[in-house]
Structure formats: C-alpha cells, structure tokens
Amino acid sequence: MKRLVRTLLAVIGILGLIVVAAVVYVTTFFDPNDLKPRLVEAVREQSGLELALEGPLNWSFYPRLGVSVEDARAWLPEQPQEDTPFAAIDSAEVSLAFAPLLTGDIAIDGLTLDGMRLDLVRDEQGLGNWETLLQRLQDEETEKALAPTSAGPAMKQDEPDVALDIANVEVSNSQVSYADRRSDLDVTVRDLALSSSNVNPENAFPVKSSFLVDSVVPQLSSKVDLKTKVRLGLDDGRYVLEGLNLESQTEMTQLPDRKQTLSLKAKQVLGEINSGDYRLEGAEIKANLAHPALGEKPLPLDLSFEGEANTEQQTAQIQDLLLTSEKGLKLTGTLSFTELLNSPNYTGQIKLAPMSLRPWLERFGSTLNTADDEALSQVALTSPIKGDMQKANLTNLTLVMDDNTFGGQLGIGLDGKAYIFDLEGERLNLDDYLPPIEEEDAKESTAFLEPLGIDSAYAQEETNELVPVDALQDLTLDGKLSLTELKVKNLTLSQPSLILKGSDGRLALERFDARLYDGTLNAGATLDVRETPIRWAFAPQLQNVQIVPLVEDYSGEPSPLRGRLNLDGDFTSRTNAPDTLMSNLNGNANFQVADGAVFDVNVSQELCTAVAMLEGEKTTRDWSKDTQFERLSGSIRVVNGVAHNDDLKIVIPGIELTGDGRLNLPTQRFDYDARARFVDTVDAACKVNPRLEQVPLPLHCEGTLEGEPKQWCGFDRQAFQQSLTGLARDEVKRKASEKIDEKIGKELEKRLGKDASEELGDALRGLFK
C-alpha cells in the first residue's frame, strides 16, 4: 500500500512538472501576438464585427494564468472605420484557475475590463445598430443546433469544458452612449463601475454597480448606485434579481441648486427571457422632488406596487398601487397596459382618499382666501381611468368637494395644456370659494361687470395680470358643466349650464344659460390672447327677470323698484391689467323694465300737488305710496369706461319721465338729468292747465355710487325757472299777437279790404312768434 501511494504521488508530481514546464515554455517561447490575425478572422466569422487590436496581447503566469489585451476596437458590418467604433476597450484581462487545467477543464478565475465603450444608436425608422449583431449571433446558434448529431460528440470530445464560475468580475471607467434619432433622446452612461464575485449559474451572487447618467435631451445628470443579488438561469432563461436596491441623485441644468433623489427597492425582479414574462414583487419607490413650483422644500412621495409584464404580448399590469405623501395624500389604484413597447395605452381604477387641498395650494404658492375657512378641506374622487402617454381620462368620475358631488368625465393632458370635461352636479355655493365680501368690497360691488365674473380679486399679484397669457396660448379646452343650483355673488341661479371651448390662444364661453328669478340669463364671452393687448368680449342677456330679488340678493339692500328686467348687451375691453379693464370698456346695451313701480315715492302725487299749489288749489284724491309705471326703457353706450345714456324714458299715467347723463365706471361717479312732463291721457293722475304740459319739471343727480342715495338727486330750480320764463315769454307773445291781430285786422279790413288784410295780418303775426 505504501508503495502504491508513493507511486501515485510520483506520477502526480511528474504530471505537475510537465504542466509547469509546458506553461513556462509557452509563456517564454510563444508570442501570443502571432494569434492576432487569427483572432480578427475568427471574430469576423462569428459576429461580423471588424476587430482592430492596436495594443499588445500578453500572457500572465504569476500569480494566475491568463491573457490580457489593450486598445481593442470593433466596428459593425459595413460600418466605415472612420466612424466611432461600435465597441472598444482600453484593456481587458481574463485569468484562469490553475487546478481545473490539470483535469482538462477551464474555470475563469477573474475578468477585468477597463475603459469599455459602447456606442448604441437607433435610427429614424426605429432600428438599433446592435440588432444586426444580435441577429448574426442568433443565426450562428441556430446553425450549431441544426448540425448533424454524429458530429456533436466527436467535436465535444476535443473541446475543453468551460465552467461558468468566475471568482471576480471588475468593470471600471466604462461608458455606454445611446442616441434615439426619432425622439432626439441622447443619453450617456459614464464612469460605469461594476463588481461581482462567485459568478455562477447555480447560486445567487452579489452585484454592485455605480455610474453617472448624462442626458442632452432632457438636460440632466444623475448619479446612480445599484446593489442586488443575481441568479442566472442560463439553461431555462430564468433570471432573478433579489433584494434590489437602487438609489439616484439627479441635477437638472435649469435647476442647479435643487437635487432630485429617488430610491427603488424590490424584494424580487423575475425575468423569463424565453417567454418574455417579467415580474416585480414588493416594489417601493421613495422620491424627493425639488422644483420652485412645488414650494421651497422638496416634495416627498412614496409609491409601492406589484407589477408584471410580457414583452411578447406588450402588456403589463400594476397591482396594489399606493401613492402617499405629506398633507394627507393617499392615492390607490390598479393599471393595465397594452402596446407597451410601441404606443403604451392604459386602463384601470384610481381612488383618492378624502384630503384637504388648502395646504397643497399653499405649497404651490397660492394663498387661499375664501369666505368659508373650511372650503376645499374635504376633496375625494374615484373613477375608472384610461389614456396614453399624452392624456389621462377619468371616464366615470365621482368627485366630492366638501358638501358638493359631481359626476361625469374628465380628461387631462399630461403636459398640463389640455382639459376636457363633461360634469353634472347638484347645488354649488360658489361664494364659499370666493374671497369674503368686506365692507369696502361691498361698496364696489356695483361695478358694471362684476356680475359677469370680472373681479380684481383674481388678479395675479406677482405679475399684476388678469390671466397668464403664456399658459393660455397653448391651452386646449372643451368643457360642459350643468348644476341643479348655483349661488354666486349671493345670486341664486337655477339649472345653470355652460359650454367652454378653447384652442390656439382663443377661449370662449360659448353658452351660459340659467333660470334667474322667474326669468332667464343667457351669456357668452370670449378671450383672445393672440392679440396685444388681449381682447375680452361679453354678451349678457336677461329676459323677464324679477328686479326685487335680483337687487336685494346681490346688494343686500332693499330694492328701489320692482318689475321685470330685460337687458341685451355687447361689450369689449382690451387689457390684461386689472386696474384698466373697466377704463378700456366699450360697447352697447338696451334695457327695459315692464309692469314696474318705484317704491316709497309717488311722482304723480308730487307733481300734481306742485301744480295745484301753482294754481292755488289742493289735491283731494288718495295716493298710492309707490309710483307705478307702464314701461321703463333706454340704452347705454360705453366709451372707454364711461357709460352714456340719453334716451331714458319712463311712462307713468299722465306723466312722462325722460333723462340723460353718464356714469364713469372706474371712478363710479355719475352726472344725470331727469325731466318730468305732463301728458294728456285718459288715465292721467290729475288735470292740469294745457300750457303746463309744455313745462318740464327737472331733476339733477350727481355723486358716486358709493355715496348716500338720499343725497344724489335734487330739484333743479334754475332749470325750472328758465322753463317758466320761457313759458311766460311765449304767453306774452301769444297775447300780444292776439291783440295786435284784432286791432290791426279791423283797421286793414276797413282800408284794404278783407282779402288783403288777412294776408298782411299773417305776415305781422310772424314777427311776434
């Protein structure tokens, strides 16, 4: 037995000496650079790549057996060598484990790549420059698989067994460039470093990588760190990443002082290469987004989900989606994708848990000043969702906003430039969401256009603009909204509905209809931001609207008159500054009030009493406390913010009131003259001397709308005296004419005859008229 052992040890020793001697001989007397032409030809035959080995090939014997190459470059088939190489390395080294060589096996002990560079390009037709290479390699594999079975064993007997069991892998100072000429995407992965150990197909092995991502479009730079364990399924095509942990820090060129951070963790990422099935389990994304529009502090977001996809069918599903953040944000849902690799479309369901929008608006820089301090404190929604990479549509939306519920459809462009909606709701008190009416605001609430929604409270203080022109130029809008009841500016509108359209810088309120105090309100409006200055247009119409509730609800004061109001207007203004909107207003309107009355004053009583006193009489009838009129009508002409009226007419039994004047809308100062005249009608309030029917009883009004109404108007004595003086002068002329006519007529008739005297008398009477 001892002899046998000594014999075996001697044989092993001899074999070892032979192997060592052979290695020493090969590394000493054989130059590997002589193999360059054969290597270049072999690479060309196997892959079609044109290989250039500019640096030396070297053997290494100690401390490990291996081969290294420097400065190698490769071009794709038919690629000019003047172009950037498809692939290149500064240096590479492969070392083999010594012990397996004694049994004829090859085990890779280490693989090192330094300065590797890949240049990937996808052309205008979507074809990648690497696809030709992959197709060539697949064809080679197919040829081997179809080779005669008799040739296989013989060939394998002469080939050494290469075991994939790499002790160490190191990649450093590497770079991968990717350009997509269809989308102008240009991304470079640089400073790529990767390390791994115990790489084998049987057990999971650790992988650690770090790299920088530079993007030209969009302009950003990211630092990425990756840690995971990898299982290689070389036989069944099943690849698994366990305990994936990816972290990144991104800087955008336009935001140099704000870093975006993101981390992705997943329990497992599974890829079935042969079937195209992929699954992501226990995924969690944590991000901190920094942007001026999101406030001073970064916005934290947490997203967790389960996902799976199939690249062959181009489908994907996201389950158990949960998005949370500060200030009570909680969004849940599911999504399913189709056409994943070409033009992704998705459907699913989302649900937003009740939350307050007030702190979010404050984060985005909007100071919320509402009459109700609790407005927008409870907002929630649920809806199916469908869309693509350009838009998202909530197809059966239920939106809860405080005590209000809306249903319908809502579409949003993901670039924030398109909104499509068709919503229905019940009662909405818009006053709760508008700024509170303070005492000073209440005095200005009689401004002409405020009922149409023009209010300087909505002006953007930072830019001092009514609307953001740049944002509206590219806005697309198509919306419908209908409610059971709407309360705005304390006015109650029943069954209101509106249609909004907008594109290419022109927005239009095509129709706004509502029932308003037993009448109807119809309005249209346009905003054209293509012009400079921008152009506003309004066209309000009121039909048979009861004045009493309209005035009392809007102003909070008792109405001075009753009746049914009809109004038809058309106005324009050209400005984007809140302080010049009214001063640039131009347009016209016609108005009429039927079956009305002026409260707490009886014009007929006042005028009839005044006339009776002039004639030394008294009125004895019982008078109503109000002035009833058959019709009040007129027109308004607005020129540069000043409203002119010169045809006011109020018809009262036996009395006609007319007036003219103007109102400066920006300053709310007015100057108005009214005149009352007796007319001979069957239903006249009182009988007067026919000559007094020619005398207008003047009233002069002036002041500001914010002043005290009792001090606005007064009897115009000077104008009245002038009217009486004119009447007296006419009366004197009339009487003088009669006396002259009588005296001269008799004398002329006596001397000239009857016919001649009449002709001369007519000429003399003309001198007194």
Image (spheres, grey):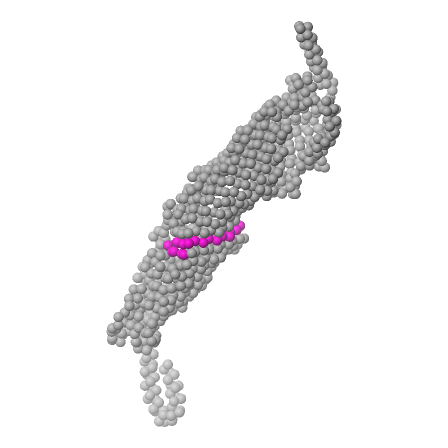
Q: Position of residue 712 (x, y in %)?
A: 32, 62
> 4 or 702, which lies in front?
4
Q: Residue at x 46, y 42 (%)?
A: 352
Q: Residue at x 50, y 38 (%)?
A: 321
User: Furthest-top residue in view?
Assistant: 2
- The quadrant in which the C terminus is found is bottom left
Residue 586 seen in render: no
Q: Position of residue 137 (x, y in %)?
A: 69, 33
User: Furthest-front residue in view?
Assistant: 149
Q: Quadrant of residue 103?
A: top right
Q: Quadrant of residue 202?
A: top right
> 663 or 153, which lies in front?
153
* Residue 588 to residue 414: above or below: below
- Left or right: residue 483 versus residue 415 is left
Residue 130 seen in render: yes
Q: Residue at x 34, y 52 (%)?
A: 439
Region of the chain picked out in magenta, as a range: 473-494
- Left or right: residue 306 versus residue 542 is right
* Residue 428 to residue 567: above or below: above
Q: Position of residue 714 (x, y in %)?
A: 31, 65
Membership of 763 in magenta stretch = no
* Residue 458 to residue 157: above or below: below
Q: Position of residue 387 (x, y in %)?
A: 54, 45
Membership of 475 in magenta stretch = yes
Q: Main secondary structure of the magenta part?
A: strand
- The quadrant in which the N terminus is found is top right
> 173 or 142, which lies in front?
142
Label total for image? 0
Q: Residue at x 42, y 48 (%)?
A: 405
